[in-house]
Amino acid sequence: MAYWLMKSEPDAWSWQHQIKKGVSGEAWSGVRNHTAKQNLMKMKKGDRAFFYHSNIGKEIVGVVEIIREHYTDPTAKKGEPWVVVDVRALAPMPMPVTLTAIKTEPGLKNMALLKHSRLSVQPVTAEEWKIVCRMGELKM
DNA sequence: GCCAACGTTGGC
DNA sequence: GCCAACGTTGGC
């Protein structure tokens, strides 16, 4: 299983929105960056991703599961190459993990979140995943 | 193919 | 509101 991190501005799409979609989940639409798109295309059913609130909050608030692999983004203009995956909320972070906390944790200093702050869909290593779950007091 | 101008993201 | 980082566009 691979691990990821997906960013969303809570004004546009928040963890609460995601929760409301329940087990049937929702398409992760609107990615308009080629590096992020490549990551969407690498995702496999069953992979897990941190749900990060950018701009407002700046913290990891939950975990989603990829429930459908990439297909054409219905919100893209005809002929454009953008894709989505479907994700469903799996578990909230009992203790949201803030960007500040991530920055001060030595084991997370190489996280893409810090190195490529503008990339909206990014890989997370198994080690990073473990550390963040421990910080968030999430048993997974 | 280079690069300046411009737009967007996202932290502060 | 500002600005750094970075992607895109368009003139040459």
Image (cartoon, coloured by chain):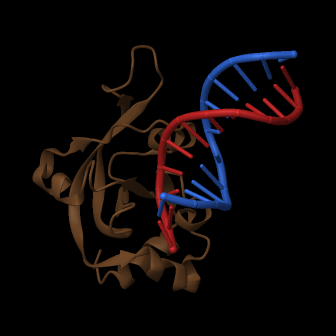
Chain colours: A brown, B red, C blue
Q: Nearer the viewer, residue A22 or A17?
A: A17
| Image position, residue C6 (x, y; %) | 65, 48
Say whether residue C12 is left or right of residue A105: right
Can you say which quadrant of the picture contains the N terminus of chain A?
bottom left
Q: Residue at x 44, y 71 (%)?
A: A129
| Image position, residue A34 (x, y; %) | 56, 36
Compared to residue B3, the image places residue A20 above or below, namely below
Q: Residue at x 29, y 63 (%)?
A: A63
Can you say which quadrant of the picture contains the C terminus of chain A?
bottom left
Q: Nearer the viewer, residue A40 or A126?
A: A40
Compared to residue A80, the image places residue A38 above or below, namely below
| Image position, residue A39 (x, y; %) | 50, 45
Q: Does residue A1 show up?
A: no
Say whether residue A18 is left or right of residue A1: left
Q: Residue at x 23, y 59 (%)?
A: A15
| Image position, residue A65 (x, y; %) | 29, 54
